[in-house]
Amino acid sequence: MKQLPDNVAAYKRTAEFNQDTIPVGLLHAHQTKDAVWAKIVVLEGQLQYTINEPEKEVLILDEQVYGVVEPTMLHEVKPLGKVRFYVEFYR
């Protein structure tokens, strides 16, 4: 599992999303800006996290497994039933 680098600090967090309120943009390939990392934290349920590059990787996130988004890498999420999560940004 990917880890956040030791030298980054959290600076912003999204609102809490659920299967009905996920912004459409998160469901399709998108990316963070250069030098911006993110952590996808699931509070309830499961979320499919797909990293599209450099090689496709599909992870199932839940309360015990969070997702790490590397800068500029295309990725997307998909709810697997009922889910609650938020995204925290680091630089």
Image (cartoon, rainbow, N blue to C red):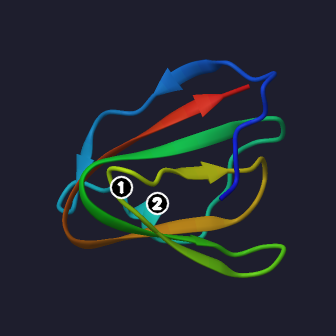
The residue identified by callout 2 is: 26
Answer above or below: position of 81 versus 4. Answer: below
Q: Callout 2, which amino acid?
A: Leu
Answer above or below: position of 78 versus 25. Answer: below
What x and y, as percent, mark residue 41? 41, 44
Q: Callout 1, which amino acid?
A: Pro
Residue drawn at x 70%, y 54% is 2
Residue neighbourhood size for the residue with mark 2, other residues' Cα within 10 Å, grouped as few (<14), some (14–19), many (≥20):
few
Q: 68 or 78: which is nearer to us?
A: 68
> Which residue is farthest bottom?
56
Residue neighbourhood size for the residue with mark 1, other residues' Cα within 10 Å, grouped as few (<14), some (14–19), many (≥20):
few
Marks 1 and 2 sit apart, C-alpha to C-alpha, by 6 Å
Q: Kindly indicate the quadrant of the structure image that contains residue 60.
A: bottom left
What x and y, as percent, mark residue 73? 76, 60
Residue drawn at x 83%, y 41% is 34
Left or right: 3 with respect to 89?
Answer: right
What x and y, as percent, mark residue 68? 62, 50
